[in-house]
Amino acid sequence: MKTKEVIGKIIKQENISTIDVNKLSNTFVINVPDPYKSYYSRFTHINKPSSIIFVTKTPNSFENILRTTKKINATYNTDLVAAKCEVSIDRRKINGIRVRGINRYNEIPQIQQYYKDAGFDFAKSEKFEDVEALIRINRFMNIEKIEEGFYHSATEENAYYIEIPKHLEWDEFRTMTYEIKNNMSDKNFDIAQGILYQNGGITEILRVVRPKISLEMLKSIQEKYLKKLQ
């Protein structure tokens, strides 16, 4: 199946916690749980981080994050995937670098040091646990078209994307999603809002995460949103 690389944005709500050990001294590091495992093991310690955010004092451009990560991977033989992100907690906005591809929590300080040596300035340490946050991530996506309006991530086995016809404000999306999931017999999937920049414009999408989800279930999810959007 042919894949293509596009730039996109994912907006999701997660309960996040700070990492208080295995980090550079007096730096602000956030752990974001795996969107599917979180249904069953949100509080279970795992050796391999899913998604880590290095909080920075100021915003950094997507281009700078990508260039720096490419150089780090080439120099230190790492396989990091980084993105620009913004975390909103209540009315507070926090800027950072979302990093995937870290194999163990005890590798975090060294990875941080690579970014620090490249000029990134980390925010001072904070501590909280299981706090609800809205996370916006700008990133590249490799996608495969399954059928018109449906895509599968070529790099994340359990991630799928569904086109929808219009933009939803976050509160509207959250309310709609709550109603839809509570009226489905199978609720064991994670869903986020997003956009793809492609074909000279913006395509509104839903990002669905669930192992081995069927196309039939993806179509059922899309149909429920379409009915709400009428």
Image (spheres, helix red, strand yellow):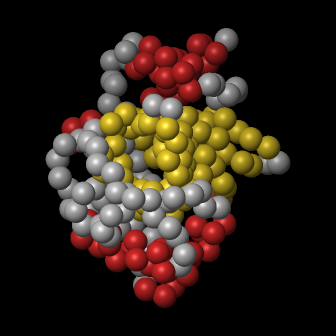
How many numbered markers are drawn?
Answer: 0
Quarter-wise, where is residue 24 in the image?
bottom left
Nearest the camera: 219 or 37? 37
Residue 75 appears in the rendering: yes
Residue 208 location, x and y as percent?
A: 47, 38
Residue 131 horizontal side relative to residue 114, left or right: left
Identity of the residue drawn at 48% across and 88% down: 75
Q: Residue furthest left?
A: 44
The image shows residue 98 at horizontal and vertical percentages of 47, 57
**The residue positioned farthest toward the bottom in the image shown:** 75
Relative to residue 39, is residue 54 depicted above or below? below
Task: Give the left or right position of residue 184, taking residue 63 as reference.
Answer: left
Residue at 54% over, 21% down = 171
The image quadrant of residue 164 is top right
Is there any visible trace of residue 1 in the rendered image? no
Eyeballing the image, is 74 above or below 214?
Answer: below
Residues 191 and 27: in front is 27
Q: Is residue 182 left or right of residue 167?
A: left
> Residue sitting at 51 percent across and 17 percent down?
176
Residue 106 is situated, as x and y percent measured from the top left of the image, at 24, 70
Q: Position of residue 170 (x, y in %)?
A: 56, 27
Vertical comparison of 190 with 121: above or below: above
Where is the N terminus found, in terms of image quarters?
A: bottom right
Which of 157/51 is in front? 51
Task: Check the picture and name the quadrant holding the C terminus.
Answer: top right
Residue depicted at x 40% and y 71%: 112
As drawn, 213 above or below 157: above
Quadrant of residue 5 within the rendered picture:
bottom right
